[in-house]
């Protein structure tokens, strides 16, 4: 005997969205922002080894919030996709937009057809090269892509943090240190301070090497916040 | 190519080769006659790391290319070089570079030097036992964990052997090895190792028709690479020219005689 009841699609989507949002809201937020010479991602992360920010390719980085196992699998898939594409064609052919589309399609599929939607929100950042521009793509749990012009905020409290960051940060890109300070203040809010060892910061920046991603260590983070 | 997602059971892990095979990115081995081959490359240990010197010539029945790069940085602390089939060798270097980087990104940790050396074994084994396009690499680098330079050589079936002194690959091996056997001392300085490695390649270029020596007319010189705790470093062309010019001058003085004080 079947217990299937009719559920209106509006209701189904609403329930699924609520479920995903609830899962995402349990974790801390991330800010990705363009600074004067690159892109920085700032995450509040008490763990020093379970990363939320990662290198995908020479000029592409990844950040995820929500369920760790779910966004980490997406991170791994992104690295495989990028290395596989670069190996098959050329390193120049690895484009963040293509990867973003794949992520969006997968998240969208899981949202509508999966057992449950993924409780994640991810950010794909690309550093400009002679053939591409700097990009911040935010992909929501339902596969919606937002092409963010200056900065992106992911996570449960995104709207509040987004507003705070928008108020502090100037329209034109500023230095790395300044951008990081603004991001940390926005993440912390007025009532709280975040210790430097609770921050995870990844940077895409040209340093005359092919790979542009760099993870800042504790000392570097502390120095930026002084 | 779609988004390569795997469930926990079929996940290929941080190995790029395992992933590439599951996704059929690597071509299946085919049988074909050898076309272009290469080489003499030497790697030697010294006090502050390792030195690798390799010629630049690719040879079929004639000289196919005079400026092939047979030594490449596999990553910041590892140099890898190839002998044998040029086509398979280049592919091999590409795969090694990509694999080490892939592992690093996937697991947020670098492979140990020994891990990198072992990783190449099955690749060599499969290539060499399934195609006539035999390729033999040489891997040398700075072992950050043990703070020492290390040299690894391979046999045709993929066996990986660590050498405590030096290793040589390619058709000019007998001549290069002869020079190294006479000149090598443990704990040489980096400069001494560079001189000796260059001399070994000079000897090979002088005697082996498939090895190119210094080409003073075109300004193409064998590559000289060092890997120390500061990482992989490649000598610029003028620096290579200097090293080989000195050997060349001495050899001219002696009328081409190599013996005596090991010129």
Image (cartoon, rainbow, N blue to C red):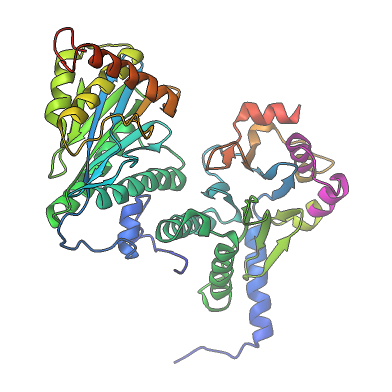
Please state the extent of the stretch shown in magenta in the rendering. Answer: A162-183
Q: Is residue B84 left or right of residue A202?
A: left
Q: Is residue B207 visible?
A: yes
Main secondary structure of the magenta stretch: helix
Q: Is residue B228 visible?
A: no
Q: Is residue B248 above or below residue A96?
A: above
Residue B216, position as x, y percentages in the image:
34, 29
Q: Residue at x 50, y 74 (%)?
A: A115
Locate residue B114: give its quadrant.
Answer: top left
Locate residue B53: give its quadrant.
Answer: top left
Q: Is residue A215 above or below residue A103?
A: above
Q: Is residue B154 above or below residue A120?
A: above
Residue B263, position as x, y percentages in the image:
21, 13
Q: Does the magenta segment cover residue A180?
A: yes
Residue B16, position as x, y percentages in the image:
36, 52
Locate residue B184: give its quadrant.
Answer: top left
Residue sitting nearer the eye, A66 or A181: A181
């Amino acid at each position: 005997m079947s217990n299937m009841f009719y559920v209106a699609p509006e209701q189904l989507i609403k329930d699924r969205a609520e479920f995903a949002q609830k899962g995402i809201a349990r974790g801390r937020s991330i800010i990705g922002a363009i600074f004067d010479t690159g892109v920085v991602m700032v995450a509040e992360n008490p763990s020093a080894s379970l990363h939320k920010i990662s290198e995908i390719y020479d000029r592409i980085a990844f950040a995820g919030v929500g369920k760790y196992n779910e966004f980490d699998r997406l991170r791994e898939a992104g690295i495989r996709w990028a290395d596989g594409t670069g190996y098959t064609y050329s390193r120049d052919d690895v484009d963040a937009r293509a990867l973003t589309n794949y992520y969006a399609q997968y998240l969208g599929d899981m949202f509508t057809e999966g057992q449950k939607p993924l409780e994640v929100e991810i950010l794909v950042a690309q550093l400009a090269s002679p053939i591409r521009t700097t990009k911040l793509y935010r992909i929501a749990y339902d596969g919606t892509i937002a092409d963010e012009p200056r900065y992106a905020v992911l996570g449960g409290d995104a709207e509040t943090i987004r507003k705070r960051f928008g108020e502090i940060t100037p329209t034109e890109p500023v230095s790395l240190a300044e951008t990081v300070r603004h991001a940390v203040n926005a993440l912390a809010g007025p009532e709280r301070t975040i210790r430097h060892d609770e921050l995870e910061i990844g940077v895409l920046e040209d340093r005359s090497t092919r790979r542009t991603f760099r993870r800042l260590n504790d000392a570097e983070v502390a120095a930026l916040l002084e | 190519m779609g988004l390569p997602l795997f469930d926990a059971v079929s996940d290929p892990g941080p190995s790029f080769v395992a992933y590439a095979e599951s996704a059929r990115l690597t071509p299946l081995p085919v049988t074909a006659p050898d076309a272009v081959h290469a080489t003499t490359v030497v790697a030697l240990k010294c006090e502050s790391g390792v030195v690798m010197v390799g010629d630049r010539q690719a040879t079929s029945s004639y000289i196919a290319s005079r400026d092939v790069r047979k030594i490449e940085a596999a990553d910041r602390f590892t140099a890898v070089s190839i002998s044998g089939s040029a086509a398979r060798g280049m592919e091999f270097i590409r795969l090694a570079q990509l694999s080490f980087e892939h592992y690093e990104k996937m697991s947020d940790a670098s492979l140990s030097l020994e891990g990198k050396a072992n990783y190449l074994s099955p690749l060599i084994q499969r290539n060499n036992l399934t195609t006539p396009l035999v390729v033999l690499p040489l891997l040398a680098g700075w072992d950050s964990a043990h703070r020492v330079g290390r040299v690894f050589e391979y046999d045709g079936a993929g066996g990986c052997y660590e050498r405590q002194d030096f290793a040589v690959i390619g058709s000019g091996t007998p001549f290069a090895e002869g020079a190294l056997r006479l000149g090598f001392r443990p704990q040489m300085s980096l400069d001494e190792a560079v001189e000796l490695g260059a001399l070994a390649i000079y000897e090979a270029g002088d005697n082996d028709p498939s090895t190119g020596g210094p080409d003073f007319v075109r300004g193409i010189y064998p590559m000289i690479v060092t890997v120390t705790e500061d990482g992989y470093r490649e000598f610029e062309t003028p620096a290579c020219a200097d090293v080989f010019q000195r050997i060349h001058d001495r050899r001219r003085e002696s009328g081409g005689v190599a013996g005596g004080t090991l010129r």
